[in-house]
Image (tube, grey):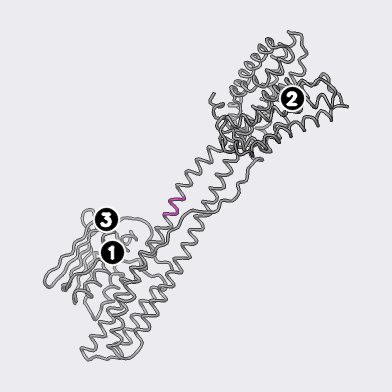
């Protein structure tokens, strides 16, 4: 019953009006008709009979194709009752053509009523089974095409992300380099210092803020290529799983056989023999399923599996044919035509059912794969997005922190040289070299040495001559931080930002940076002897603290400021994120 319900859901009109369904109907028509006429068949009229069957099958599908194009029929969609009506109308036309052909070409009785009923009872079930197979195989091909398109889309997104990030970084670094190189040109110290400070607010800070808000969005939208149906592979897979369906085979055997049997032995005897046919089919194919389950556990190869399936199927059909032949002989009717029909048509029906089961299994499998792959692709796109954002953020922090600190320190040293009456030319040369060194670091994507103590000492060195920065990190704590590259990057970013703010906004001349461990966290305390004046809007530094810190607190006094930042405890995590070179 479940198989019949599934068949009714998957047999659509578009799949019924298809070349596979036509081929199956043509072969079945030939097998049934020639088996039924064995007692009168001669070599002379064999070509005429074959031509008559072919024309009738073509007429059947021609009518189905024309009806399928009618607006009224198309408006009803592919619901099963409309598909059933469509195939039944085609079978009626086939019966009319078969009856007319028998009268005109063979000069025999037309038997139009019998031909119509026989066409409906035999070909309608077979075409519906074939339509279900076609529909499942097409759906599988479409899902596979969608899966391949989604994978291509992710690959394209990754390549586009890499190219776009690289281009954006190169353009950003080139722009910053150009404005800063222009700023440090000249020999007038006040002009150089003023231009450097001007570029901090006019270029460096806006660029750093723009970078963290301008990450493009990528999706997995892609052009799906036309689906390719894998008909050749379907038969190799048809003998996997459970190709024998006793209930469905028995039901189809009863529906297909009742007309032909009743035509030979009468209605009452025909019903009894057909019930025997269905019962024998149910029993024989139940045994075949059990035998097949044992054979399948041995994992034979594809060719051997097909041969074994054919042997088991023939054995079951011979058993069914023997039971029905015994009933025919008891009644006194020639059993050869019905035996030939059971074996030949039975092979076709059983093969169609096996293909249907394979198509259903494949569709279920590829649907599950598509669902799982969709989740994986969504994660992959999210990863592309996250990596791109992290790369933008790293460059933004490098510009906002390290580069800005070097530029601000260079300007401060130039101003100090003027105030102290020092060597102006040496001060300009030193400022120029400091800025160029910082730009060179951006070019190669250098955002850390891999040693947190060295990175923190670089911060102190950047402010040398402007502010004394004292670094306090226990070697054991530093070693554990270095084992966690992500934590090391955060520590350096927080300290860079805190020191830059203390000098630029609080006029600090002494800064102390202490990094230590709490029970379950990492703590950074930055103290300075400066006190910020006025109110400052939240910027990239505040955003950084909000994102990475468990908690943070800034305390401002009359002549000192302290910042305490508590970070998650260190551990071995992902590689240190770096800007794209």
Q: Position of residue 234 (x, y in %)?
A: 63, 38
Crowd rating for badge 1 (residues with CA inside 10 Å; few <14, some 14–19, many 20+): many
- Mark yes or no: residue 350 visible: no
In the figure, is residue 287 to the left or right of 425? right
Magenta part, dominant SS: helix
Q: Position of residue 387 (x, y in %)?
A: 41, 59
Residue 130 x/y as whole percent: 64, 32
Dot 2: what SS? Answer: helix
Tag 3 residue? 569
Which of the labelled discs sits on residue 491, or is there none? 1
The reply to whether residue 575 is in sight is yes
Furthest-front residue in this view: 72
Which residue is at the front of the view, 447 or 548? 548
> To which residue does mark 2 refer?
32
Residue 116 vertical placement versus 493 (above, below): above
Q: Quadrant of the C terminus?
A: bottom left
Give the position of the N terminus as an image quadrant: top right
Residue 463: name its quadrant.
bottom left
**Badge 1 element:** helix
Alpha carbon distance from label 3 to label 2: 79 Å
Count of numbered labels shown in the rendering:
3
| Mark 2 burial class by Cα count in 10 Å: few <14, some 14-19, many 20+ | many
Distance from the alpha carbon under mark 1 to that under mark 2? 83 Å
């Amino acid at each position: 019953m479940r198989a019949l319900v599934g068949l009714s859901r998957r047999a659509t009109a578009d799949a019924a009006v298809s070349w596979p369904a036509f081929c199956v109907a043509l072969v079945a028509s030939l097998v049934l008709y020639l088996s039924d006429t064995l007692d009168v068949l001669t070599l002379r009229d064999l070509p005429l009979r074959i031509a008559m069957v072919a024309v009738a099958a073509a007429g059947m599908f021609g009518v189905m194709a024309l009806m399928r194009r009618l607006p009224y029929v198309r408006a009803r969609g592919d619901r099963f009752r409309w598909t059933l009506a469509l195939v039944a109308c085609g079978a009626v036309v086939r019966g009319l053509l078969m009856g007319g052909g028998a009268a005109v070409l063979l000069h025999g009785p037309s038997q139009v009523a019998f031909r119509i009923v026989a066409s409906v009872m035999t070909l309608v079930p077979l075409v519906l089974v074939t339509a279900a197979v076609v529909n499942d195989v097409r759906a599988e091909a479409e899902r596979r095409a969608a899966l391949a398109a989604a994978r291509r889309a992710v690959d394209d997104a990754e390549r586009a992300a890499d190219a776009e990030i690289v281009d954006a970084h190169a353009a950003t670094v080139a722009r910053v380099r150009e404005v800063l190189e222009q700023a440090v040109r000249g020999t007038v110290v006040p002009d150089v210092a003023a231009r450097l400070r001007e570029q901090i607010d006019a270029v460096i800070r806006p660029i750093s803020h723009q970078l963290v808000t301008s990450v493009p969005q990528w999706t997995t939208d892609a052009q799906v290529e036309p689906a390719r149906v894998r008909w050749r592979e379907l038969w190799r897979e048809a003998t996997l799983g459970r190709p024998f369906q006793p209930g469905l085979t028995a039901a189809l055997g009863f529906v297909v056989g009742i007309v032909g049997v009743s035509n030979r032995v009468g209605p009452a005897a025909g019903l009894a023999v057909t019930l025997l046919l269905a019962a024998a089919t149910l029993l024989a194919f139940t045994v075949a399923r059990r035998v097949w389950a044992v054979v399948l556990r041995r994992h034979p190869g594809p060719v051997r599996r097909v041969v074994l399936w054919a042997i088991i199927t023939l054995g079951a059909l011979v058993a069914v044919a023997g039971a029905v032949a015994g009933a025919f002989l008891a009644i006194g009717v020639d059993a050869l035509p019905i035996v030939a029909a059971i074996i030949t048509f039975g092979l076709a029906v059983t093969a169609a059912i096996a293909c249907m089961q394979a198509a259903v299994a494949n569709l279920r499998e590829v649907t599950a794969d598509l669902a799982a792959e969709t989740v994986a692709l969504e994660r992959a796109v999210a990863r592309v997005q996250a990596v791109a954002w992290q790369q933008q953020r790293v460059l933004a922090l490098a510009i906002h922190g390290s580069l800005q600190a070097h530029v601000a320190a260079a300007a401060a040293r130039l101003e100090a040289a003027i105030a102290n009456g020092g060597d102006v030319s040496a001060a300009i040369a030193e400022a120029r070299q400091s800025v160029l060194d910082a730009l060179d670091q951006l070019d190669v994507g250098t955002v850390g040495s891999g040693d947190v103590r060295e990175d923190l000492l670089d911060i102190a060195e950047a402010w040398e001559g402007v502010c004394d920065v004292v670094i306090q990190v226990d070697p054991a704590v530093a070693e554990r931080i270095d084992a966690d590259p992500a934590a090391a990057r955060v520590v350096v970013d927080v300290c860079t930002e805190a020191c830059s703010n203390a000098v630029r906004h609080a006029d600090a001349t002494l800064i102390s940076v202490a990094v230590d461990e709490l029970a379950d966290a990492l703590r950074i305390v930055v103290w300075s002897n400066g006190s910020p004046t006025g109110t400052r809007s939240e910027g990239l530094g505040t955003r950084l603290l909000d994102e990475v810190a468990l908690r943070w607190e800034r305390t401002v006094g009359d002549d000192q400021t302290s910042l305490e930042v508590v970070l998650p405890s260190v551990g071995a995590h992902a590689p240190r994120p770096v800007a794209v070179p």
